């Protein structure tokens, strides 16, 4: 194999705001693995909250360069384990490499990854489109910019969250999911949950800070809406911990280290009776196409990250009003266009 690292800085369609901050630019590190004339791609973006930077991701990947360039790709799961000692402290870099390995693996074998896993595309959940925090008028305009979606994910975490949801509800009959990104207290969540239930909200994602387990126990016992963990479920060990505190888990590839651990987390969550969602960060089509390989295994999916960009860097999976369309390309279906 040959390893190459690419850096991209991409403007967002709109400034993207959640409860803990805003961003106008997405800074991505793309991993390219080449073998036998074929190339696989994986991605991870910088993230202040999780301490991921171009520099520390690249440094982590340089530590495994001799292992990669001294061998041949046979099984992405085996490669993940081989690289684990060097990468387990940087799951963003670990994810980018694992996704690139899966993309290359599928291309080497002449099939899409989902098919190599024995899955079918007969039943796929629709993806939502995310409406970042803004003035109410601008949030309405964002829905009108992408009309006709079956599900919208509404970012909350303000002192006027109910007003936001009520205002948006006047402009669409679509299902809403709300994501507080740790921005509420127990008392706020208990006050808002029954009112949101009356506004066709499907579930609440990460209402409380991840360290507030006692608050989550109390909220789970009383909430009329299902609760889905995000910041509280980052790695494999967190799935078991969420049992009894949440109704479901949202798995992010960059947080857990890629497709290899994500599949194990999905299986474990199913065993425990938890609902399963896979979500994205702001990502290009490279990362979104990887998530799509898992879609047949999921109850919910949030894979709109590339639509939040003003410009993309790859071709692959596309999304039309929540419906995922797979390319004819093998692997994860990715080709760089920049």
Image (tube, helix red, strand yellow):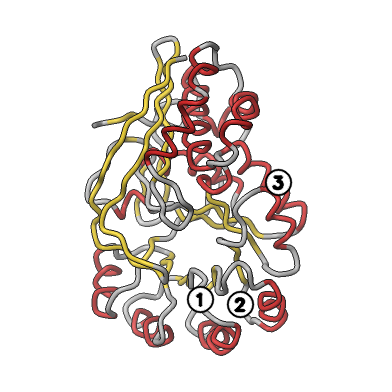
Mark 3 to mark 1 CA distance (whole Å) = 26 Å
Residue at image location 42% in from the left, 64% down from the top: 150
Question: Do residues under tags 3 and 1 come within 8 Å of each other at their CB atoms?
Answer: no
Q: Residues within 10 Å of mark 2 (few under 14, many from 20)?
A: some
Q: Residues within 10 Å of mark 1 (few under 14, many from 20)?
A: many
Q: Which residue is mark 1?
A: 201
The x and y percentages for residue 46 are 38, 47
Q: Is residue 27 left or right of residue 64?
A: left
Mark 2 to mark 1 CA distance (whole Å) = 8 Å
Q: Is residue 218 left or right of residue 91?
A: right
Residue at image location 74% in from the left, 56% down from the top: 240
Residue at image location 73% in from the left, 60% down from the top: 241
> Which corner quadrant of the image does residue 130 belong to?
bottom left
Question: Do residues under tags 2 and 1 come within 8 Å of each other at their CB atoms?
Answer: yes
Residue 328 visible, this angle: yes
> At numbered mark 2, what does the secondary structure look like: helix, strand or loop?
loop
Q: Residues within 10 Å of mark 3 (few under 14, many from 20)?
A: some
The x and y percentages for residue 76 are 58, 26
Q: Which residue is mark 3?
A: 267
The x and y percentages for residue 204 are 55, 72
The x and y percentages for residue 176 are 46, 72
In the depicted structure, whether residue 172 falls above or below residue 56:
below
Q: Which residue is mark 2?
A: 225
| Mark closer to the chain start, 2 or 3 | 2
């Amino acid at each position: 194999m040959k390893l190459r690292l690419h850096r991209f800085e991409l403007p967002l369609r709109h400034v993207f705001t959640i409860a803990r901050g805003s961003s106008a630019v997405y800074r991505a590190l793309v991993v390219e693995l080449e073998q036998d004339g074929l190339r696989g791609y994986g991605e991870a973006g910088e993230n202040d909250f999780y301490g991921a930077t171009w520099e520390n991701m690249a440094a982590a990947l340089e530590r495994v360069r001799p292992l990669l360039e001294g061998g041949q790709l046979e099984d992405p799961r085996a490669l993940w384990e081989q690289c684990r000692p060097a990468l387990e402290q940087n799951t963003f870099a670990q994810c980018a490499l694992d996704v690139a390995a899966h993309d290359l693996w599928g291309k080497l074998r002449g099939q899409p990854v989902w098919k190599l896993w024995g899955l079918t595309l007969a039943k796929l959940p629709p993806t939502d489109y995310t409406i970042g925090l803004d003035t109410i008028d601008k949030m309405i305009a964002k829905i009108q910019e992408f009309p006709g979606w079956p599900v919208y994910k509404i970012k909350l975490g303000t002192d006027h969250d109910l007003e936001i949801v009520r205002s948006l509800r006047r402009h669409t009959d679509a299902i809403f999911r709300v994501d507080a990104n740790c921005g509420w207290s127990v008392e706020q969540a208990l006050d808002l949950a029954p009112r949101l239930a009356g506004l066709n909200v499907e579930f609440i994602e990460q209402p409380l800070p991840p360290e507030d387990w006692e608050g989550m126990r109390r909220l789970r016992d009383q909430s009329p809406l299902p609760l889905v963990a995000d910041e509280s479920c980052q790695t494999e060990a967190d799935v078991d911990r969420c049992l009894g505190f949440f109704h479901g888990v949202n798995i992010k590839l960059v947080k857990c280290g890629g497709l290899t651990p994500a599949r194990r987390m999905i299986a474990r969550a199913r065993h425990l009776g938890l609902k399963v969602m896979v979500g994205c960060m702001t990502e290009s089509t490279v990362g979104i196409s990887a998530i799509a390989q898992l879609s047949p295994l999921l109850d919910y999916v949030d894979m709109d990250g590339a639509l939040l960009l003003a410009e993309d860097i790859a071709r692959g999976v596309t999304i039309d009003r929540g419906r995922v369309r797979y390319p004819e390309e093998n692997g994860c279906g990715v080709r760089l266009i920049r």
